[in-house]
Amino acid sequence: NRPKKLPVVLGQEEVHRLIQCVTHPKHRAVLLTLYAAGLRLSEATNLKLPDIDSARMQLRIIQAKGHKDRYVPLSPRLLGELRAYWKINRPTQYLFPGQTDDVPLSGATVQKACKLAAATAGIKKLVTPHTLRHSFATHLLDSGADLRDIQELLGHALLSTTQIYTQVSMEK
């Protein structure tokens, strides 16, 4: 049984600085998606174009951890960023394709982009793509969202998994 460590969380201003430091359109879009939708790295890299439902303002997450599907809200800002990215890259299958259109962007590439952005932004914390998910959950809690709703958005099977964020929230 591993010791439970509190997650590293960025402040909203730090997230903003981190995203601003990403110049590559695809890397910027994937990091923004991780934060704005609270996704796991594999969930973001495996998104396909039909998973974006702009009419219902939702992202469909297919066969995530625990082999579960779920929907997460698609914010107007994220949709705007994804549309701007799409105009530049024109992906045809995966939203964030790797070397070729038929494979997703590698997790290692996203991790490198995240580390570089954190360094460029002057953030001294250990920042990984998962830090953006932790930050998403904590910022929701800070803004008054219900823990059960956050559990649903993150796709956690157990509420106890989501409760870790109550220990890093500024609204204790």
Image (cartoon, rainbow, N blue to C red):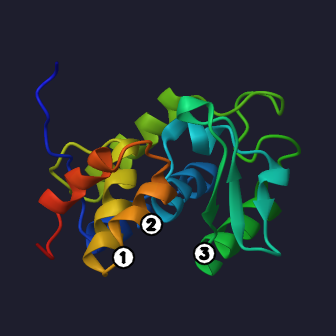
Q: In this view, does 154 lie above or below 57?
A: above
SS label for mark 2? helix
Q: Mark 3 points at which residue?
A: 75
Q: Mark 2 points at which residue?
A: 149
Q: What residue type is labelled 1?
A: Ala
Side of 47 relative to 91 (left or right): left
Give me the C-alpha separation between circle 2 and circle 1: 7 Å
SS label for mark 3? loop
Residue drawn at x 50%, y 65% is 36
Earlier sequence position, callout 2 versus callout 3: 3
Give me the C-alpha separation between circle 1 and circle 3: 16 Å
Q: Name the residue under label 1.
A: 145
Residue drawn at x 59%, y 28% is 106
Side of 28 relative to 26 (left or right): left
Side of 77 relative to 167 (left or right): right
Give me the C-alpha separation between circle 2 and circle 3: 16 Å
